[in-house]
Image (cartoon, grey):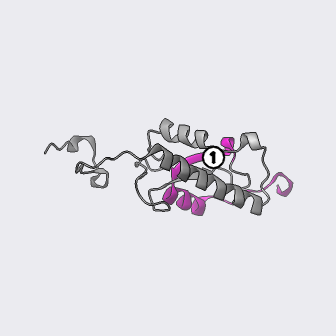
Amino acid sequence: MYVALSRTNDIKQLYIYNGTDLRINEKQLKQRIKLKIISHKRADADKSRYYKPEDYIDVQWVRDNLDYTSLVCPHCNEDYSLLSRENTRLDFSIDRVDERYAHIKSNCVVGHRHCNNERKKLRPISKGKDEE
């Protein structure tokens, strides 16, 4: 067995390959993304967050962002666990930068579900233009 520990300084990022296929099925990944988008659209509608359909996140936008970040969360620099069950700590999430606006491409980043939830706790409540 060959081990390269020089590539990490965090034991949590050490993975042991046991011969199973570590790739996620592209069709399954796209289905997970579609379900997340459906859920976000429902939440945006419930909160009356309006958007232009062409500006809303789509499967390709999420896929491009996952690829762009090399499957690493921009908040904590840890890998996404695409093989884990959905809604786990290291599952990817589509995070709105400004909570007042819908899940539009210019207002979202892809990060860990855990990081998204932690960032919500730290965000100050934004005032609208009319409230300033």
Question: In which quadrant is the C terminus drawn?
Answer: bottom right
Residue projecting furthest to the right: 130
Residue 83: x and y, percent? 40, 53
Pointer 1: what residue? 108
Question: In which quadrant is the N terminus drawn?
Answer: top left
- The residue drawn where x is 40% and y is 48% is 79
- The residue drawn where x is 27% and y is 51% is 15
* SS at circle 1: strand
Instruction: Confirm whether the magenta stretch covers residue 4.
Output: no
Q: What stretch of residues is rendered in magenta? A: 104-132
- The residue drawn where x is 73% and y is 52% is 101
Residue 59: x and y, percent? 60, 43
How crowded is the residue under tag 1: few (<14 C-alpha within 10 Å), some, or many (20+)? many
Q: Amino acid at mark 1?
A: Cys
Residue projecting furthest to the left: 1
- The residue drawn where x is 26% and y is 41% is 7
Exactly how many numbered labels are in the figure? 1
Instruction: Confirm whether the magenta stretch covers residue 114.
Output: yes
Q: Quadrant of residue 123?
A: bottom right
Q: Quick check: 70 left or right of 17?
A: right
Residue 128: x and y, percent? 80, 54
Q: Is residue 64 above or below residue 132?
A: above
Residue 56: x and y, percent? 70, 44
Q: Is residue 11 above or below residue 56?
A: below
